[in-house]
Amino acid sequence: MDFSKFEEKTGVSFKDKALLKQAFTHRSYLNENRDLKLEHNERLEFLGDAVLELVITDFLFNKLKSSSEGELTAIRSALVNADTCAAVAERLGANEFLLLSKGEAKDMGRARQFILANTLEAVIGAIYIDRGLEEAQKFILDHIAPLADNIIADKKWIDAKSSLQEKAQEEVSITPVYKTLRESGPDHDKHFVVGVFVGEVKYGEGDGKSKQDAEQSAARNALESKGWK
């Protein structure tokens, strides 16, 4: 697979092309191609996640000088979550370069969004190793940080769980309860599906890479479905 198109689109030229290929290599691909001398991207993802959080924290700290710690944390979470990272990866054409098993390649649903998000983090990790922190920072500031303005303008960072609790108390005098409906994936890459219930009625469902993210997603879904936004 020719990754030069991805390099052109992102503006990053890799010294070690194998490292970029590794960033796109999903564990499932190696399960079907055991004879290939490749590594999957999970270690790069682990590194990239840390680099992404550091760069975005620094960016928001300097951009939003009047925001509180709680607001900065919420905005950062909205800017680095799976939905945002998947959208950026998709815009950069990452789908064309994913190395997946035949089964994973067919699934274009929510599971693909998590794969795209993880791949973007792996790419950041690969850039950090290959070109250093400055180049990784430039990639993040060019492709992810600009989304902050829309996230702030659309109030996507506001704590959906708190908003739902206020609305539920106001409308039906019941406090919402969150229940984990499903969880999947290995320990290092769990995916959670959570439902939010008001009394016996499920008001919304959401998913995420942590229970906290899934609960926020469920709360946003509930607010939208009830017209409480």
Image: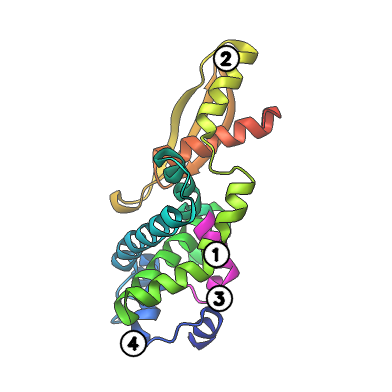
| Residue that label 1 marks | 88
Find numbered disc 3 in the image and state the secondary structure of the residue it sits on: helix
> Pointer 1 and pointer 2: residues touching (CB < 8 Å)?
no
Q: Find the magenta span and give its range.
A: 84-98
Counting other residues with Cα less than 10 Å from the Cα at mark 2, is it few (<14), some (14-19), or many (20 or more)?
Answer: few
Mark closer to the observer (2, 3)? 2
Q: Is residue 111 magenta?
A: no
Between the residue at mark 1 and the residue at mark 2, the CA separation in whole angstroms equals 37 Å
| Residue that label 2 marks | 169
Q: Is residue 107 visible?
A: no
**Mark 3 / mark 1, whichever is N-terminal:** 1
Mark closer to the observer (3, 1)? 1
Left or right: 149, with 214 as reference point? right
Which residue is at 51% across, 30% downward? Answer: 161
Q: Which amino acid does the dot numbered 3 rest on?
A: Glu
**Mark 2 / mark 3, whichever is N-terminal:** 3
Find numbered disc 4 in the image and state the secondary structure of the residue it sits on: loop
Single out the residue that lies furthest toward the front.
66
Counting other residues with Cα less than 10 Å from the Cα at mark 4, is it few (<14), some (14-19), or many (20 or more)?
Answer: few
Query: Which label is found at residue 16?
Result: 4
The image quadrant where one finds the C terminus is: top right
Left or right: 77, with 36 as reference point? right
Q: Which amino acid does the dot numbered 1 rest on?
A: Val
Q: Nearer the viewer, residue 158 or 124?
A: 158
Query: Which label is found at residue 15?
Result: none
- Residue 177: % across, % down: 47, 22
Left or right: 206, with 36 as reference point? right
Counting other residues with Cα less than 10 Å from the Cα at mark 3, is it few (<14), some (14-19), or many (20 or more)?
Answer: few
Q: Which amino acid does the dot numbered 2 rest on?
A: Gln
